[in-house]
Image: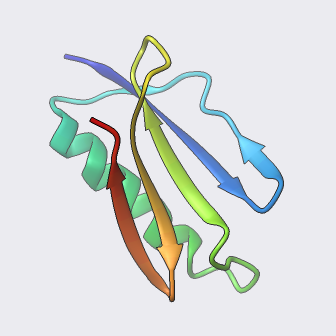
Amino acid sequence: MPRFFFDVSEKSEVYHDAQGIILPSFGAAKDRALAIVRKLETIPHADDDLVCTVRDVGGHQLLQIRIQAGKPVVSLEN
């Protein structure tokens, strides 16, 4: 099973996931990223600069989920 890394950025702050997590599929990684964004968007200071980037073990960006107009928006890289 593949390992996925979930980096979170807000404004100029970036929090890199150094450990990652093993998940059964890309779909499971997308679901986890959506859950992260939904949880973080409830924080009062979170705004449209909130982004969760999913990377593979090689460091390649697979997708990004950002908050736009209060809703999560998914951008696929491939």
**Where in the figure is residue 55, as x and y percent of width and height?**
44, 29
In this view, the residue farthest toward the right is: 12
Is residue 38 or residue 48 the one in the foreground?
A: 48
**Where in the figure is residue 10, as x and y percent of width and height?**
72, 61
Where, quadrant-wise, is the C terminus in this rendering?
top left
Callout count: 0
Q: Quadrant of residue 63?
A: top left
Is residue 48 or residue 16 the one in the foreground?
A: 48
**Position of residue 12 in the picture relative to residue 61 (left or right):** right
Q: Residue at image x 16%, y 29%? A: 24
Q: Residue at image x 71%, y 42%? A: 15
In this view, the residue farthest toward the top is: 58
Q: Is residue 45 above or below residue 1?
A: below
Where, quadrant-wise, is the N terminus in this rendering?
top left
**Position of residue 33 in the picture relative to residue 28 (left or right):** right
Q: How is the image coloured?
A: rainbow
**Where in the figure is residue 65, as x and y percent of width and height?**
43, 58
Q: Residue at image x 48%, y 26%? A: 20
Q: Is residue 39 above or below residue 65?
A: below
**Where in the figure is residue 60, as x and y percent of width and height?**
44, 22
